[in-house]
Amino acid sequence: MGLALALATWGLTATGASGHAMLQRAEPGPDSTLKRAPDEVKLSFTERLEPAYSSVRILDDRGQQVDRRDSRVDRANRAILRATLPPLPPGRYKVLWRVLSIDGDVTDGGFTFRIE
């Protein structure tokens, strides 16, 4: 019983105490290959985000920003960050995000996707 209680307590502290907004889901997904260009990039995080300090950029293979520069936290769900895209040609694209969770922790990251 003592071991079970210790494991249960460790599980709660290991998952619930971090407070960092971690990327939970991305559309398009990391390392995905798409047949057509998406209309937007949508990132879902584990924590609510501070809109004024959270952003996402989408770059082409030359490092040029290709999104519409309208990165925003979703009003209905503050754990979602979005940016719309113009029609994109085939190629490899990099998604770079930096977010501030409402408890003050900054996280950032990135991934690529490809359009055939």
Image (cartoon, helix red, strand yellow):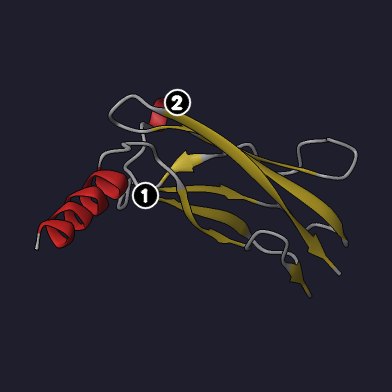
Instruction: Report the quarter where the C terminus lies.
Output: bottom right
Q: Residue furthest bottom?
A: 35
Q: How many marks?
A: 2
In depth, the one of 87 and 11 nearer the eye is 11
- The amino acid at mark 2 is Tyr
Residue drawn 45% across and 25% down? 53
Q: Quadrant of residue 61?
A: top right
Q: Mark 1 Cα within 10 Å, few/some/many (few <14, many 20+)?
A: some
Query: On the rendered image, what quadrant is the N terminus found in?
Result: bottom left
Q: Are marks 1 and 2 in contact (CB under 8 Å)?
A: no
Q: At numbered mark 1, what does the secondary structure look like: helix, strand or loop?
A: loop
Q: Which residue is depicted at the point 80% across and 57% down? A: 88
Front position in the image: 31 or 116: 31
> In what element is the residue under mark 2?
helix
Report the disc number at residue 46.
1
Seen in the picture, residue 110 relative to 91 is either above or below; the reply is above
Residue 74 image position (x, y, % from top left): 39, 48
Residue 21 coordinates in the image, percent (x, y): 40, 40
Q: In the image, which disc is placed on residue 13?
A: none
According to the picture, the residue beneath numbered tag 2 turns out to be 53
- Viewer-nearest residue: 52 or 96: 96
User: In front of the other: label 1 or label 2?
Assistant: 1
Q: Residues within 10 Å of mark 2 (few under 14, many from 20)?
A: some
